[in-house]
Image (cartoon, helix red, strand yellow):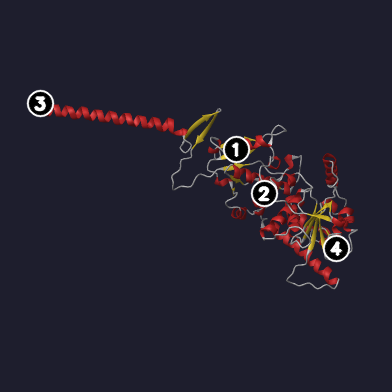
Amino acid sequence: MDLSNCKQSRFFGVHFNFLAAKCLVLVVIALFLGTVLLPTFSGLGGVIRQNNFVFVHNRSFPSNQPVKQKFLEVPQIVWGLNNQKIAFARACLTARMLNRTLLMPKLSASLFYKEVELLKPISFDKIFQFERFNSICKGFVQLSRYSAVSNQSDVIELQKGSGRRWTLEKDLEQLNQFSKHPYDAREIIRIVGKNPFLWHDHWPTKDYAKVFECLALVEEISTEADKVVSKIREIGMEVRSKNAMSSSSSQPVPFVAVHMRIEKDWMIHCKKLEQRLNISEICSSKEEIMARVGNISGLKTPVVVYLAVADTLLEDNTVLNGWKDGLHPFEKKKLGVFDIYKKQPYLFQSAIDYEVCLRSDIFVGNSFSTFSSLVVLDRTQKMIKVGETKLCGLDVRWPSYAYNIRGSGNSPHPWVTNMSDTSLTAISYGSNHISC
């Protein structure tokens, strides 16, 4: 055998083995880096153990695929309609802060404050339009159905604190913590504990107004509200015709809506509140309400006054007596629309009354009532959206008044919402602060 050929073969064999070994070492190093070092970078996948919890961290997506959607789940929303609207908006704004989509929450069709087991859950989209909400609120907050969740077991719970020691600052710190790694890796953050109405408030009034603006009643409810408003205006035309007043068919006959809070449970509550806050402008008797509504400056009569009152007052005919000449009071029974209400659960009834008050030409309510306060907020927002620069005065487009606060000449005080407030606390818990 040729010695030179033998040496050459040995050389190439040794060289080949050296290259193979070198490649093998590089592969091992690459695998080590991929499994040990890369998970420390927030943009790549991996498994992280922290505080006895295992968080699956998977945020690496191909550039041509959308980022995986993440969600916030909240407890069932309870209490009155407008307490529920505030709680819902607070849940939406919490989801926005956490950069998540709110999973469509359960509302409560019945009104129980203590007997939680008697609450009747009802889906959000049975009261408000789901698609319309997302369309109007696109880019601000969004809702999703549970069917959009890809892994319902990929959940971490956020336990809301309670008591006096759970301060506004601690609550905000907790939310900021859950907006970051590793908590933000989970597909669902589930908030457990108290009802969202009782959560700390971290958002300005204008943000709540944006959410409320996106809430449109489902057709079933808005159609019923249409019937009530039409009936009120129809009676208004009859009243005017009897008084030899002509009315253009193109111009709807105006009406006044009064949210009359004089039922026993409210009077007990407001008296206690007056004592606790050491003020005297919360409770109003029916006589005081009647007198102040009759003293509204520039009110053209005759006019129909729709009384949004609790069902317990429908048997009390005295709420219809004692009004100033030219004011024609009507409640559900006298108006002939009680059948529209009584076939519906509480939440539907309240939503119909709210819509009627919202559409009224003049609204008069109690500034310590959440119902009244949200009606005024919506009316204020409506004036701002159409470009109204004057929100207070005699010639306001949709004026509102607070009958529990005395205005000039013993009239109800003009009322608009201060959209520059840094929170909704004044509305959520009652206030006699009004901007006019």
Numbered mark located on residue 321 in the image: none
Give the Cα separation between the discs numbered 4 and 1.
54 Å
Which kind of residue does numbered mark 1 sit on?
Asn
Q: Is residue 56 above or below residue 256?
A: above
Asked whether the residues under the numbered discs 4 and 1 touch, taking CB atoms below 8 Å apart as contact, a structural biologist would say no
**Could you say where residue 222 lies in the image, as x and y percent from the top left?**
70, 58
The residue where tag 3 is placed is 3
The residue where tag 4 is placed is 328
Give the Cα separation between the discs numbered 1 and 3.
76 Å
| Sequence-first tag of 4 and 1 | 1
- 27 or 295: nearer the viewer: 295
Q: Residues within 10 Å of mark 2 (few under 14, many from 20)?
A: many
| Sequence-first tag of 4 and 3 | 3
Residue 220 vs residue 150: left or right?
right
Q: How many marks?
A: 4
Give the Cα separation between the discs numbered 2 and 1.
20 Å
| Sequence-first tag of 2 and 4 | 2
